[in-house]
Image: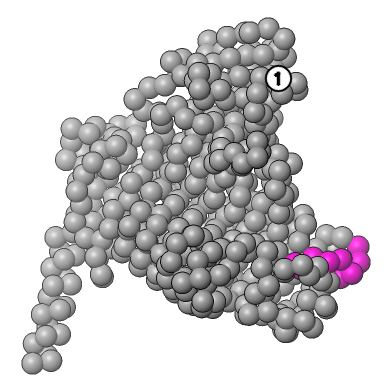
Amino acid sequence: MKKIFLLGTLTLFFVGFLFAENYYVDAVNGSDSRLGTSPEEAWKTVDKVNGTTFSPGDVIHFRAGQVWRESLRCRSGAENMPLTYTSYGGGAKPLFLASIDLCFENFWLYKGDNIWCVTPASFSTGRTPDYTDVGNIILTKRGNTEKMAAWKRWSIKELTQQADFYHDTENDLLYFYSEKNPALLYSEMEAAMKHNIFLMHGCEYLIIDGLTAAYTGAHGAQGSNTRNSIIRNCDFLWIGGSHLYTRNEKPTRYGNGIEFWGESRDNLVESCYFEQIYDVAMTNQGPDPCLVRNIVWRNNKIYRCEQAYEFWLSNSESRMQNVVFENNECIDSGFGWSHEQRPDKSGTHILAYAMESKEFDIHYRNNIFNNARIAMIRYYNTRLPEADLNNNTYIQKAENCDKLPLFYWGNIRATWEEYREVTGNDKNSTFTCE
């Protein structure tokens, strides 16, 4: 009977893959009226992908070197038959943007006093995101290659220097301070809209492999109740900055690279690259009772994000089991575009807010933490001694940095040796000043 059961299981497994289909998407030469089942019959839009029902084991390939200004609504596969979103062909990773290109002279209307204005009707099309809050405008000056961020302000009166901008969401107007028409000064002007790029809500048995998400005011990839999913070999660039809420007349902005919200189990994020994220590159968080179990973040590179990894679970019925952050390289946390614009500066590799979960099982090991603006580790709670940290490499670009209080938990500010003595953590780790 056992042999018959095993044979039946294997038969179902291979039959599932036998009938799995490959689909192709080509933004330049594709057409949504085609079958989509070969490069020659490729679809054109992400909208077509989002509106198609797939079977477990199917693979959706986006052509390398091409760009889509659309959000991808991911779907679930099944055990041993994940649904996969990936690339095909040679060239750069397929690029998904949640931004609108503003680099056209005729878009801009001069209002006087170096204030220029653009309206949604000027640039909204069926291929662009809806016009919602602009979280950031990514700029490249003409004759230059370095990207920079415009400065988000909250009223026209605050526009006083080059590249200040204000988004009047009530009247759908975007204002920009510039000495001349902005399109004459910049070769790139990408208005990052308030749209998540990869949507993973409720997904299980999902793989996202080899794609790039960039220029959004919200999150790069976000999902609640995610299980048995993998994100690998992906890039997340210039993420976040949109308005989240206002309290006590103080606006708060947000935007993460990858966010697993609430319940998440058996998920893996590996070999991804994160650069210039408003908030945090990677995070588990949620206010409601949930189970966060077997989450692995490994072999990722994080560069100039405000934080590298953050978690918070504020409900006492939540449980955290076997969350692992390992073999990651975190560089210059707090030295990105968002730090100066934030009212709530963190500038740390590891961040933890409220941690009320009744189970707390987290491991940080074999990571490189290279230079932080404010702190190496910043826990806004007292549970750092319960965490497991070891075999990490800490590097800080400051003289006598071993005397600086770079390790925060609760009300404690500790130096390297004080932190190790009190918590018992990082016994086999190293700390170097450069």
In the picture, measured across the screen, residue 186 lies left or right of residue 203, that is: right
Quadrant in which the C terminus is drawn: bottom right
Residue 161 seen from this side = yes
- 356 w.r.t. 203: above or below: below
> What's drawn in magenta, residue-wise?
399-408
Quadrant in which the N terminus is drawn: bottom left
Count of picture labels = 1
Magenta stretch: includes residue 162 = no
Which residue is situated farthest in the bottom direction here? 1
Which residue is situated farthest in the front direction here? 248
Residue at 60 percent of width and 64 percent of height = 354
In the picture, measured across the screen, residue 158 lies left or right of residue 318, that is: right
Residue 120 position, x and y percent, is 46, 19
Which residue is label 1 attached to? 157
Residue at 15 percent of width and 79 percent of height = 9
Which of the two residues, 375 or 126, is positioned nearer the viewer here? 375
Kindly indicate the quadrant of the structure image that contains residue 57: bottom left
Kindly indicate the quadrant of the structure image that contains residue 32: top left
Label 1 secondary element? helix
Kindly indicate the quadrant of the structure image that contains residue 429: bottom right
